[in-house]
Amino acid sequence: MRQMTSNLVLLPHRSLLSLRGPDTIALLERLVTNATTDWAEGETRYGALLTPQGKVIADYLALRTEDGVWLDVSKQHVADLAKRLKMFRLRSDVEIEHRDDLFVFAGLDPCAKHPETPDGAAYAYRDPRYAEGRLRLIAGSMDVEDSSESLAKYHRDRIAHAVPEQGSDFGAAEVFPAEINMDVLDGVALNKGCFVGQEVVSRMHRRGKIRKRTLRLDLPETLQAASGDEIKAPLPIGAVTSTGTAQALAVVRIDRLAAAQQAGTHPEIHETPVTFKIPGWLEADLAPMKEA
């Protein structure tokens, strides 16, 4: 097949779990947030394993293959995820293996729904968290630039598209799925059977108790924002989690954001005005808060 290594970035902060065996899908069905039915070979799904209290232990991209599932997960959290999946496995016929001999590579351009697998890669798949998709590869090695600048380009691209990432924007058992927008990124199947933490997640959704969201910020050239910086309007409404050059991601109290918008108060970091990129799906949630 044709070579597709241009504009690819090695992601040293990502790692891979291989799940193989006849009970793989049944195991995931009762544990994780994403849908596992009608899952075609080569299709990628976004999901997570949660605590019983409904917080994210580890999120991942899951690739369905002919003989199992690959999980593309934060390197910091892959060992804990493997340990917990093995604990829940019980008598299920599933082999769970951390494949530290393989690596994750990412593209920075829009990606076809079914990307071709280039020479030297084991699998090619599509990151569905981006509206236009992004290419991901599993490979032992690829002829790509491995540098801090190429990795910075990857992070700037995901921040520009409001894609939070574990290890940068949140840790283990720190956030509910909705706080990193998993529900609007098709990472939570609320209509599936039980999964770990489902009761809490479902109750938050039904009662409209989602208080925090991850949003993109547009920053002026004069502002050097950093992770942890507080956002005020004038009361604290959130904090920066990761930064690019002219943009950042932040976890924000949406009720306080709505109150600030209603009052005509502009959010600031270090007394410098910043602008939130409000997606269409959030506008509907903010409207009744402004009226309250």
Image (tube, rainbow, N blue to C red):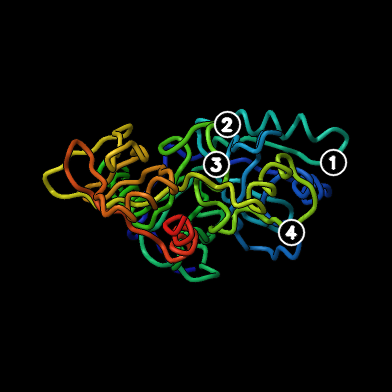
Examine the rendered structure and indicate whether residue 230 appears above or below residue 71: above
Q: Amino acid at mark 4?
A: Asn
Q: Position of residue 30 (x, y in %)?
A: 79, 46
Instruction: Please tell me the numbered disc located at residue 282.
Output: none
N-terminal of the pair, mark 2 or mark 3, is 3
Number of callouts in the render? 4
Give SS at disc 3.
strand
The residue identified by callout 3 is 73
Q: Is residue 228 left or right of residue 117?
A: left
The residue that mark 1 highlights is: 93
Of circles 2 and 3, which is in front? 2
**Residue mark closest to the camera, 4 vs 1:** 4
Q: Which badge, 3 or 4, is on the more N-terminal residue?
A: 3
- Residue 21: percent from left, percent from top: 79, 46
Q: Residue at x 34, y 55 (%)?
A: 262
The Cα atoms of the two marked residues, 2 and 3, are separated by 15 Å
Q: Secondary structure at mark 4?
A: loop
Q: Which residue is mark 4?
A: 191
